[in-house]
Image: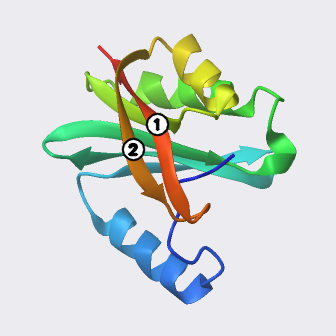
Amino acid sequence: MAAFTAKDPSDRVLFDARWALLLDDPQVTARTICVDGLIAGSVMTYIEDGETEITYWIAREYWGAGVASTALTLFLAEVTDRPVNARTAKDNAGSLAVLSRQGFEIVGENKDFANARGIMVEEYLLRLS
């Protein structure tokens, strides 16, 4: 269901360079999500247009197991800046449910190009106050 990814997610050199920039940015808080010692995903906040935005990615094999919910609960307890904005593709019911359980509310809609899908995708804009 992931829609908003790098232009070429298979380009490891580009991926590593992008993460190096993110991790060096003092306005970014990033964490690796681990399950039983294995990397299951990532979660981070960054500043977009002067506001805090959260993004996360969970490996497919961990979908539906509560990993995203647990990771976001722990992360949002650590990162206490509010409000926090989030986005999810409208057809990503799982992500919408995870964000809603954390208290995020839909505040708008948008349409943006999704690299992972190669098409324009409708998305919900959410906010945690």
Q: Is residue 78 left or right of residue 71?
A: left
Q: Position of residue 83 (x, y in %)?
A: 26, 22
**Front-most of 83 and 35?**
83
In which quadrant of the rendered image does the C terminus lie? top left
Badge 1 or badge 2: first in the primary sequence? 2
Hey, what amino acid is under mark 2? Lys
The secondary element bearing badge 2 is classed as strand
**Front-most of 112 and 74?**
112
Q: Is residue 111 left or right of residue 27?
A: right
Residue 111: name its quadrant.
top left
Hey, what amino acid is under mark 1? Glu
Residue farthest to the left? Answer: 50
Residue at image location 54% in from the left, 15% down from the top? 100
Rounded to the nearest whole Å, what is the CA distance between mark 1 and mark 2?
6 Å
Q: Is residue 29 left or right of residue 1?
A: left
Q: Position of residue 90 (x, y in %)?
A: 55, 32
Residue at image location 45% in from the left, 51% down from the top? 30
Residue at image location 69% in from the left, 28% down from the top? 94
Residue 36 seen from this side:
no
**Residues at circles 1 and 2 in contact by the CB criterion of under 8 Å:** yes
The residue identified by callout 2 is: 111
> Which mark is on residue 123?
1
